[in-house]
Each structure stands twice: as structure tokens, then as C-alpha cells.
Image: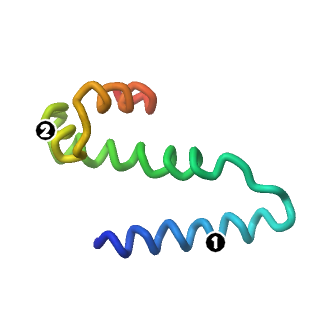
Amino acid sequence: MSKDSIQEAVHKNLEKYFRDLGEQPASNIYDMVVHAVEKPMLEMVMSRAASNQSQAADMLGINRNTLRKKLQQHGLL
């Protein structure tokens, strides 16, 4: 899956989200999308890194402490 197809999937799902909302006001979309994408991404990267947090942090391009914080936020530790 390319970066473009990930973007297309997000776009398609946001279109559906807005369609389902109808006339209701939208709120907290940024947090909703980040939370929805972040957990499965962390799960996959941790799996790929065989649970090695330093390696996973390098793969993600973030600090290991930031990774630990995100893993805790998503209940993955």
C-alpha cells in the first residue's frame, strides 16, 4: 500500500463520515482521525519491530519516550 492509497482511504472514510453526519455539526475531527489511525499504526510497527521500542521509534521517526507515551495512551503497554 502506498502513501497515496492510505490518503485515499482516509479521504474516502471522511467523506462517508460527513455524509453520515448529514446536517449535524462535526467536531474534534483531528483527534478522531489521529486516534483512529495511530493505534493500528503503533500495533503494526511494534509487531514489525518484534516489540523493540527503540527500533519501532526509529521506524516511526519519533523519540522512544514519545513512543512509550503513545503506547500507554492506547493501552498497548
Numbered tag placed on residue 27 in the rendering: none
Three-letter amino acid code of the residue under disc 1: Glu
Res 15 → quadrant: bottom right
Numbered tag placed on residue 15 in the rendering: 1
Q: In this view, does 70 lie above or below 19?
A: above
Residue 19 point in image, percent of width and height: 74, 71
Res 49 → quadrant: top left
SS of the residue under disc 1: helix
Residue 25 point in image, percent of width and height: 82, 56
Residue 50 point in image, percent of width and height: 14, 39
For disc 1, the neighbor class at 10 Å (few under 14, some 14 to 19, many from 20) is few
Q: Is residue 41 above or below residue 21?
A: above
Residue 5 point in image, percent of width and height: 38, 74
Image quarter in which the N terminus is found: bottom left
Q: Mark 2 points at which residue?
A: 55
Image quarter in which the C terminus is found: top left
For disc 2, the neighbor class at 10 Å (few under 14, some 14 to 19, many from 20) is some
- Is mark 1 in CB contact (under 8 Å) with mark 2? no
| Residue at the (18%, 47%) spot, across then down | 59
Work out how far the residue at label 1 is from the one at label 2, CA to CA, in angstroms. Answer: 35 Å
| Residue at the (34%, 49%) spot, across then down | 41
| Residue at the (24%, 46%) spot, across then down | 60
